[in-house]
Image (tube, rainbow, N blue to C red):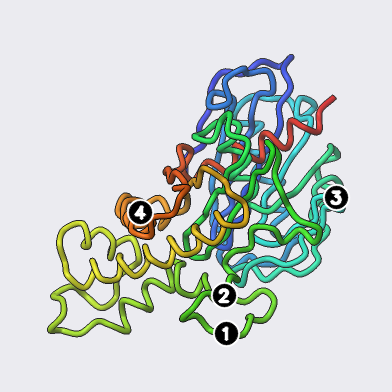
Amino acid sequence: MPLEKVPTSETESYVAAVDIGGTNLRLAIARVTDSEPVRSIVARSQTSTVGTRAADAVVVLIFNGIEALLKQASIPRSSLKAIAAGAPGITNVETGVVIVTSYLLGWRDVPLRSMLEKSFGIPATVDNDVKLAALGESWAGVAGGVSDFVFLAIGTGVGSGVFLNGRPYRGSAWTAGEIGYMLLPGLPADPPERGKPGGLENVLGGDGIKSLWQSQWNQTSTKLPRDLQATEIFDHALLGDALAQKILTQTARTLASAIYNISLVLNCPLFVLGGGVGSHPALRPAAESVLKTWGTRVQPRLVISALGPDAQLFGAIRLAMNLLP
């Protein structure tokens, strides 16, 4: 992807944002003094991490990528004051250790913060990527001014970022929001091994929806191909395919069940849907319809992420800025 660039000043301060995914690495440089968050990013890039799983190799990719962005944006190295990174897994924010990532990356007890600080020579901080997405939506997206909300990231996997009393809630063992491991009726009763897809994730995530489609597919029920992605199935549901609509309804009911249970515990008025599957235009109204049929006294409001795939980057920018004096 070509690097994006806007005019910069050598006298200003900047922070770096990193979004580490199982298949992609996304980087951004942001101006600290910009009063509008959506205008703070001055340069960004994206590269594949396929075949690059080792933490030290990923840190090298991050360092080289940030150096390239600084050069492209004509920003002196001394103007970069802090860096924040999001990883797809349970992360101890206090120690800067990524305890365990998703099966796509496979990290265990990686001291990512210290590795970044050693590479860049500036303060660093790390957090779970979905929690960063929630922070991003709070700072620059649809959750601005909302003290209590839940960000639901539904893509290949499933996770959430919880905001309570205007602050991210991470839990005593940093696992708050790991809803992909929720056990619901109809799901496998035994919790999975650490780092493996969870019960809810296996049904609500993109791979789970694809498997559900394939298990019900036959040549008499649909004229569509057997090998469709979750978002393609939802596309065809909007176009009227009966089997695709059935899969959408089942998925929406599962999502509504998760939202209902979370609402009972946290009583959050807002749920932000993100990720490639979660932000699909077919899923939100379908889940809302299910929630309304249950007639609960308090109906949480469901909205689509305003920042889309940039939510994590904006959250990382905000977290990096918190390191500055």
Tell which circle, 2 or 1, labels the residue nearer the N-terminal end.
Answer: 2
Q: What's the residue type where badge 2 is placed?
A: Leu
Q: Are marks 2 and 4 in contact (CB under 8 Å)?
A: no
Q: Which residue is found at the position 59% from the left and 64% from the top?
A: 179
- Foreground residue among 244 and 252: 252
Marks 3 and 1, Cα distance to the nearest angstrom?
33 Å
Which callout, 3 or 1, points to the residue nearer the camera? Answer: 1
Whether residue 186 sits left or right of residue 171 in the image: it is: left
Q: Which residue is mark 2?
A: 183
Foreground pick, 231 / 305: 305
* Cβ atoms at labels 1 and 4 below 8 Å apart: no
Q: Disc 1 vs disc 4: which is toward the camera?
A: 4
State if disc 1 and disc 2 touch (CB < 8 Å). yes
Residue at disc 3, secondary structure: loop
Q: Residue at x 51, y 36 (%)?
A: 3
Q: Give the spatial CA distance, label 2 vs label 4.
A: 23 Å
Identify the residue under disc 4: 292
**Residue 134 image offset from top left, x and y in percent:** 60, 44
The crowding category of the residue bearing disc 1, from other C-alpha atoms within 10 Å (few below 14, some 14 to 19, many at least 20), is: few
| Percent coordinates x, y for residue 308 in the rendering | 46, 43
- Element assignment for label 1: loop
Q: Secondary structure at mark 4?
A: helix
Q: Is residue 316 above or below residue 259?
A: above
**Label of residue 94 in the image:** 3
Relative to residue 153, is residue 214 depicted above or below? Answer: below
Q: Judge the density around disc 2: few (<14), some (14-19), many (≥20) Cα neighbours within 10 Å.
A: some
Q: Which of labels 2 and 4 is toward the front?
A: 4
The label on residue 189 is: 1
Q: Are marks 3 and 2 in contact (CB under 8 Å)?
A: no
Task: Identify residue type, mark 3.
Answer: Glu
Mark 3 touches mark 4? (CB < 8 Å): no
